[in-house]
Amino acid sequence: MTEESTTMRLIEGGTVVDGLGNAPFRADVLMRDDRIEAIGADLAIPTERPLHRIDATGLTVMPGLIDAHCHISFDEPNSNDELFFHRREGLAAIIAAAHVPKLLAAGVTGFLDADSLYEVGVDLRDAIEAGIVIGPRMSTGGNALLTSVGGTAGRLIPDEGRRGYGKVVNGRDEIVQEVRRQIKIGVDWIKVHVTGLTPRQRVKGEVQVWSFEELKLVCDTAHELGVPVVGHCRGASSTRDCARAGFDMLLHATYMDDEALAAVIERGVPIVPTFTFQANLADYGEAIGATPAIRELFKREIAESAVMLRRAYEAGVPLLCGTESGFSLTPYGDWHYRELEVFVRDLGFSPLEAIRAATSANAFALGLAGETGAIEAGRLADVIVVDGNVANDVTLLADKARIRHVFLDGREIVIPPIPERGDPPGWRPSNYGSRTLTRAVVDAIGAGRPAT
């Protein structure tokens, strides 16, 4: 991978979609060093430096996408067993570094990885910022905080200690100690897995596995040291309590009731619905053998939650775009546009509103609100040039061939073809097959008895 040396660049003749929700307009965009210097027609061009011109006639000039929910260290597992028991720390870091070019190739110039395997996210972010790895801007958490009830992995989570991306904390002292330890190593966010799955639960969505007092303790401890807190919430009570406890951002916030909605609106807590995972399973699950029942379940989760999320948005709550990229259903580089499509289709956003949710509004997830995510003078020059009218059809971003140029910090990133790869030994589960070979299975396929 190479990048051009820093110089002044002029993107000429394109249609600017500014990421702020304004109507598209024809203009040139001048970038000096890492900033956008000016936007308009007949710009006065300084002459003290060489000028590199980019012809964008007939193309869209827009901010790079920001993905507010991406698991860069997971490497697309098919199961929790694979994620928690088949990953090694050094390889997780190396393979994560190999994945970040896929995000750039998809037009992503920033992402949040709120929790990571072995906390490799901190090291990857630092390597990107030091220029050792070429990748998008990155903000990161460490291990997700869990109670001994666990998260969505059930009994795979131990009663104490660390496993995979999670750290189990039991009691006030462990909560405070772990939050402070993660801040010491340099996280940008503290993530709490507020809900989980239990074998005999009687609630829709997931069960809240933290008390309000525990959630408030996490926030108070992190905020005293200037670090924001994000929570995984699938359920009404968890969303309500996180908002009241002082969480700075919520992931999912599905199945809200009126009380949860009121709490979110009162606090103005940004929400990252992250419907891409569910939408992919609902729309394309047949291709990977998903049953009609599970596809319908995920389809209903979107439909039932969209009403309340729309009400939150209309009341001023920011809705941000995140894709949960990093699982087998959401592989890196393929689906970073998809949440925009879902926002338009299921939440009633206009394409320009969806673009804003994936750019200027999403800069909050990077800790760079007002600094990036928009084509505006003074902003960081994180810009993509796309073939087609994205303001009319956000799904054009699905075609990576349409992304003609990617600029990060004002420098054009040139990404060579990414080769196919294999898996290291033990990286994936090894199975004899997908079914148990009972006699009834053999008889059903007409194999009969083996010859003697």
Image: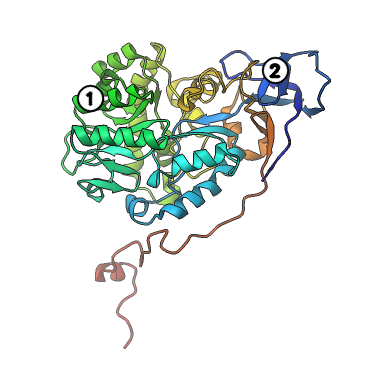
Q: Quadrant of residue 40?
A: top right
Residue 125 in percent (x, y) is at 50, 38
**Residue 206 visible, this orientation:** no
Identity, as a three-letter code, of the amino acid under mark 2: Glu
The residue lying at 39 percent from left, 18 percent from top is: 310
Earlier sequence position, callout 1 versus callout 2: 2
Asked whether residue 322 appears in the rendered view, the answer is: yes
Mark 1 surroundings: few (<14), some (14-19) or many (≥20) residues within 10 A? many
Q: Is residue 393 left or right of residue 268?
A: right
Tell me residue 281's x, y (percent). Answer: 41, 41
Circle 1 SS class: helix
Residue 396 appears left or right of 314: right
Q: Position of residue 71 (x, y in %)?
A: 44, 41
Which label is found at residue 237?
1
Identify the residue at image location x=49%, y=45%: 331
Q: Residue at x 44, y 64 (%)?
A: 425
Mark drawn on residue 37: 2
Question: In this image, 405 relative to 65: left or right?
Answer: right
Display coloring? rainbow
Q: Position of residue 68 (x, y in %)?
A: 46, 30
Q: Residue furthest bottom?
A: 452
Q: Nearer the viewer, residue 319 or 121?
A: 121
Amino acid type of disc 1?
Answer: Ser
Screen quadrant of the C terminus: bottom left
| Picture disc at residue 118 | none
Tag 2, which secondary structure? strand
Q: Nearer the viewer, residue 326 or 399?
A: 326
Q: Nearer the viewer, residue 287 or 267?
A: 267
